[in-house]
Amino acid sequence: MSDRTIDRYLVIGNPVAHSLSPLIHAEFARLSGQVLSYGRERCAEGGFAALLRTLLDTGLRGCNVTVPFKFDALQAATQRSARAALAGAANTLWVDAAGAVQADNTDGVGLVRDIESGAGVAIEGRRVLLIGAGGAAAGVLGPLLAARPASLVLCNRSADRADALAAGHREWAATHGARLQTASIGSPFDGVPVPYDVVINATASSLHGAASPVPATVLAQGTLAVDLMYGDAAAPFLAWAQDSGATGRDGLGMLVEQAAESFQVWRGVRPPTAPVLAMLREHLALQKAAR
Ligand code: NDP
């Protein structure tokens, strides 16, 4: 039986057994002296709204939402943050004091924080390539533009999805002085093929065995090349980046930073991220060694 005196949170997804979120939030709670529980819940396709209602009725305070339910999460909420509305997707839900279900999207701010603080690369004034137009790309595009790159080129295997995503962000890009363009995934440049300062792979291409969906000409010595994947799935992309002299970075730092943002939204406390990232890297290394 669950203890209803402890604030309960969890992550909903499918699959969700592999999720590192319970480990991350348990560590955040320990390091910041917060008392809470954080579990995981697998949701059947089409069952998100009903499952959320059941969980909230039994006292759930909030949840993270992962693939493939981030769009359903936004629809299930009664109030949406500006960044969730811009993304059209939510990864963080909670019940506020008035009983309303609030939705937020912390993926983008997590990625920007990991690039700027974790990797030490300021986005302002840089040329950025974002590959992908799924839920992850939708979540990170707005915050990337808000970091004021000189230009951001968006490309995706299905070009129409990139066009639609860009169209929804044109005004936002102009407000932040960033030039936003789309390009073909085979030649992802805004004119002349000059390598980028920052390349972000927000596709699931590595799950299908491809190192990168774009040609290596997007990279140069000094490019920061980030794959939102982590663990073994990120290895081919990181090797591809290294072969061109770029600096590869996996998505583990973003995972921790987006979780920290959710934790702060829920608890009003900012947890430390560096020790949690180090703990996770050790955890994944031990898991790998045990295989
Ligand atoms: P979606 O299913 O919504 O989108 C998948 C994206 O990948 C689409 O752009 C799709 O293109 C593209 N894609 C899939 N297969 C290929 C391929 N073989 N070649 C080229 N492009 C391909 O997934 P999400 O956007 O939600 O997630 C993408 C990845 O990001 C996931 O693997 C997820 O684990 C990771 N992620 C990591 C986070 C972190 O914190 N580190 C946070 C969120 C996500 P098309 O439109 O043509 O189908």
Image: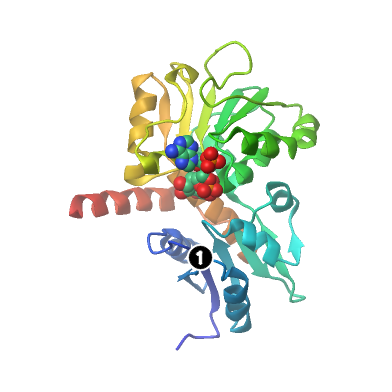
Q: Is residue 136 left or right of residue 237?
A: right
| Above or below, 211 relative to 266 | above
Percent position of residue 37, x then y: 49, 74
Q: Nearer the viewer, residue 269 or 283?
A: 283
| Above or below, 35 relative to 134 | below
Q: Look at 46% across and 19% down and name the residue there.
A: 219
> Can you tell which quarter of the image residue 64 is in?
bottom right
Q: Is residue 120 left or right of residue 242?
A: right
Q: Look at 33% across and 29% down and name the residue there.
A: 239
| Above or below, 277 relative to 223 | below
Residue at the outermost bottom position:
1
Mark 1 — residue?
11
Q: Look at 49% across and 86% down and name the residue there.
A: 3
Q: Is residue 50 left or right of residue 164?
A: left
- The answer to whether residue 268 is visible is no
Q: Nearer the viewer, residue 119 or 136?
A: 136
Q: Look at 58% across and 69% down and name the residue there.
A: 48
Percent position of residue 171, x then y: 80, 35
> Can you tell which quarter of the image residue 102 is in?
bottom right
Percent position of residue 289, x then y: 20, 50
Percent position of residue 225, x then y: 46, 29
Q: Nearer the viewer, residue 267 or 214?
A: 214
How busy is the neighbourhood of tag 1: few (under 14 within 10 Å), some, or many (20 plus)? many
Residue at the outermost left position:
290
Q: Is residue 17 left or right of residue 200?
A: left
Q: Nearer the viewer, residue 237 or 197?
A: 237
